[in-house]
Image (cartoon, rainbow, N blue to C red):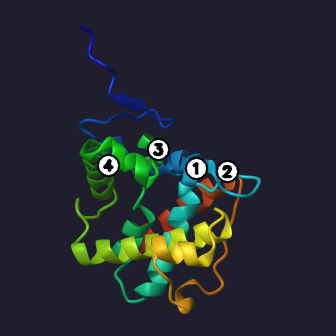
Amino acid sequence: MKQARAWQRMLSGRRLDLLDPTPFDIEIEDIAHGLAFVARWNGQTRGDYPYSVAEHSLLVEEIFGRMQPEAPVRWRLAALLHDAPEYVIGDMISPVKAAVGPSYGELDKRLASAIHIRFGLPAAVPERAKKAIKRADSLSAWLEATQIAGFDAIEANRFFGRPRPELIEGLEIRLRPPVEVRAAYTARHAELMARL
């Protein structure tokens, strides 16, 4: 019986083994490209472009910076990369993740570890930084829910928590063509890497 293919050919030419990913097969251009084409909210958002995981990741990193202005640059980079595995496995909404079970989480964890090592981070982000990134992720979801996904503030508060106004002041969801989002993600990654 022929074994199923468990690798993905990337546009960079790299061949990423999903069962045993290595840092050597990871390129930021592949991540930025993939995330710029992966829609959050299963595409159920208002606007002329889907709201991409790349755009979401930029917002999470910005919110994290507001929450933790003194945090080391490496944790801002971890915030930018918090959903990076989705460049190859896609973005599953929470109800689907729950239905798939622990195997999705294990795959995500293996990919995240390889990505972190590739860019000079520890394989596992320390719990304190991970919790702060998760909080920034929830605040981003609140903004997305209320600005482009049809939730009212009361419903968003119930699911994502009520944000402190100073953390989200002036933040507006931007829907841009994938080529623009890809460039913005790659540029922000380069800025953070230069500051490590």
Name which residue type carries label 4. Asp
Q: Secondary structure at mark 3?
A: loop
Residue drawn at point x = 29 percent, y = 62 percent: 120
Name which residue type carries label 3. Gly
Depth check: 53 or 45 in front?
Answer: 45
> Which of pointers 2 and 4 lies earlier in the amino acid sequence?
4
Label 3 close to label 4 by CB (< 8 Å): no
**Which residue is the extreme one toward the bottom?**
166
Residue drawn at point x = 67 percent, y = 50 percent: 179
Depth check: 83 or 195 in front?
Answer: 83
Which numbered marker is on residue 9?
A: none
Residue drawn at point x = 45 percent, y = 32 percent: 13
Left or right, residue 116 beside residue 150: left
**Residue tagged 1:** 39
**Residue tagged 4:** 108
Left or right, residue 27 beside residue 180: left
**Residue tagged 2:** 179
Residue drawn at point x = 48 percent, y = 75 percent: 158
**Residue tagged 3:** 90
